[in-house]
Image: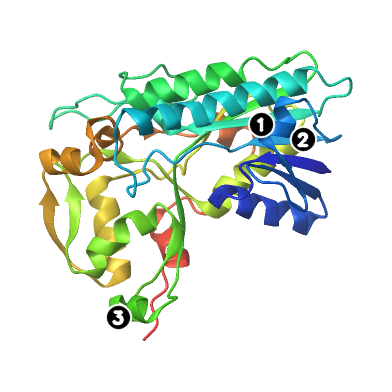
Amino acid sequence: MRVLIGGGSGFIGRALSERLRKRGDEVTWISRTAGAGRITWDDVERGAIPACDAVINLAGQHILDLRRVWNDDYRREVLESRLRTTRALVNALNAMPEPPAVFVSTAGKCFYGTAEVSANCSYPVLDESSSPMGVDFPAELVAQWERAADGIDATRIRHVSVRIGIVLGAVTRSSALGRLWRIGRGQGFLPLVRLPFCLGAGAVMGHGRQPVPWIHIDDAVGVIEHVILRGDARGRYNAVAPGVVSNRQFTEELARRLRRPVVWAAPAWLVRRVVGQDRSTILLQGQNVFPRRTLESGYQFRYSALGDALADLVHITV
């Protein structure tokens, strides 16, 4: 196939590109800068899209980039990076005389929102048919993002929307400092949380009961590949592992794999101060997301249990 990927240079985009190229597919990225095997977002806004069979949009500024201070400017940047690119891509695809067979738009599990759940209650199971359990900034962001993608002409282009959970990628040793900490740099969610563990200060977030809807990078790529190839796949699919765990379970399993202790629980007020009120709900209030339609469509997860996923991803050498 000829595949066009928006955000192809990102974590998921690179892994997806590698998988598709191994299949023999021709992959072109949509990027901010021109280059070999790329077109730019300016090209998209002009409607200059090459002939292709499938389009996947992964573009968007990372909401949990902790290098950035959470303020009004960054909030607008996160919104615009998703909405402007999605609208431009949808308009360009709709205008093509011979459009691609399938358009895969992606968003986050944050669509389902968050809500406080008391200690004696369980978090509700949320599948692809569920409404948000509460509305916060991440949920509104995803809702606007999906509405922009829903502008695609579904009478001519098969539209699949994939809601992706917290993506776990390999963490590898890559520097002298990394050797000192026994673990180095990586991609995905694990690099965001590895440093406290490496320093011996691994922590549960808040009360620790909140669910963590995670997914191994191989399965994140696998779900996208699956819905591209399955010609009857339409609508929403959750890209989260069926074995959702609590924040405390996630933290303890990661600590065990890193051979580091869990020494404290970071209070909610501290998390809010560090990451900002809008982003704190992602860490402090989870969603018990289940991939019902994904499983019903025939996708078989390679990593359904967190222990198996971390055993594959976390490598310590001495």
State the quadrant of the C terminus.
bottom left
Between 182 and 272, the one lying in front of the other is 272
Labels 2 & 1 near each other (Cβ < 8 A): yes
Categorize mark 1 by other alpha carbons within 10 Å: few (<14), some (14-19), many (20+). many
Q: Classify mark 2: helix, strand or loop.
A: strand
**Residue lying at 76% horizontally and 23% vertically, measured from the top left:** 93
State the quadrant of the N terminus.
top right
Q: Is residue 125 visible?
A: no
Gap between marks 3 and 2 measured at Cα: 44 Å
| Residue 187 screen position, x and y as percent | 46, 58
Between 124 and 208, the one lying in front of the other is 208
How many discs appear?
Answer: 3
Name the colouring of the figure.
rainbow
Q: Give the answer, above or below, for where 20 lies relative to 87.
A: below
Residue 288 shown left or right of residue 82 in the figure: left
Quadrant for residue 227, please give it: top right
- Tag shown at residue 75: none
Looking at the picture, which amino acid does disc 3 mark?
Answer: Leu
Q: Which residue is mark 1?
A: 104
Q: Residue furthest bottom?
A: 318
Q: Which residue is mark 3?
A: 180
Categorize mark 2 by other alpha carbons within 10 Å: few (<14), some (14-19), many (20+). many
| Residue 278 screen position, x and y as percent | 27, 30
Q: Which residue is mark 2?
A: 54
Q: Classify mark 3: helix, strand or loop.
A: helix
| Residue 216 screen position, x and y as percent | 49, 52
Q: Between disc 3 and disc 2, whose residue precedes?
A: 2
Looking at the picture, which amino acid does disc 2 mark?
Answer: Ala
Looking at the picture, which amino acid does disc 1 mark?
Answer: Val
